[in-house]
Image: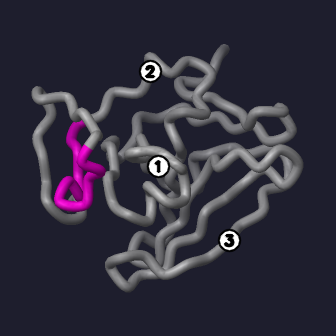
Amino acid sequence: MNAKYSGQCLCGEVRYSVDIEPVFTGNCHCKDCQKSSGSAFIPAMIFPEQDVVVSGDVKYFESQADSGNMHKRGFCPNCGSQLFARFSNMLGMLGIKAGTLNDPSSYVPKLDFHVGSAAPWDFMNPELPKKQGAAKN
């Protein structure tokens, strides 16, 4: 049986699977996500970490987010793909970057958040709700 959500890094050394629905899905437009991804936003899915099965070694780097909270980003140490996120204000939760899904069509964002920091050239889906600051769970 296939996992509900599965994905991997670019080289395939790090893989993950999850059999439950995410607690949250949304596109983060904060400056941290823009700089760490090199893009306009990060499409994020949040799951209880205990429900995510990860194979392969993940290298985490920590930085202080715009909010003042600590944010750890998880990368494949072989190819450098950014796959995961851990947040000091969301203990026990794991963020998954939706661009790493094997089936990207399974990602359905519920809102755009930190839109006050959005790049001026970013085009957001007008049908999604917008939140100026951080999304509340």
Whether 115 is among the magenta residues is yes
Residue type at mark 3: give it: Phe
Colouring rule applied to residues: one colour
Residue contact between numbered discs 2 and 3, judged by CB atoms under 8 Å: no
The residue wearing badge 3 is 61
Asked whether 122 falls inside the magenta stretch, the response is no
- Tell me: residue 29, above or below residue 101: below
Seen from this angle, which residue lies furthest front? Answer: 121
Instruction: Specify the segment rendered in magenta.
Output: 110-120
Element type at marker 1?
strand
The residue indicated by pointer 2 is: 106
Which circle, 2 or 3, is nearer the viewer? 3
| Label 3 close to label 1 by CB (< 8 Å) | no
Badge 1 amino acid: Phe
To which quarter of the image does residue 85 belong?
A: bottom right
In the rendered view, would you say 33 is above or below 12? below
Name which of mark 2 and mark 3 comes first in the sequence: 3
Side of 124 where 61 appears, left or right? right
Q: Position of residue 80 (x, y in %)?
A: 77, 49
Q: Which quadrant of the rendered structure holds the C terminus?
A: bottom left
Q: To which residue does mark 1 refer?
A: 47
Q: Secondary structure at mark 3?
A: strand
35 to the left or right of 118: right
Place residue 1 in its image quadrant: top right
Q: Is residue 52 above or below residue 102?
A: below
Front residue (pair 97, 46): 97
> Residue visible at 26% across and 53% down?
118
Residue 122 shows which numbered tag? none
Q: Position of residue 36 (x, y in %)?
A: 55, 59
- Measured in 3D between alpha carbons, the distance from the residue under mark 2 to the one under mark 3, in whole angstroms, is 27 Å
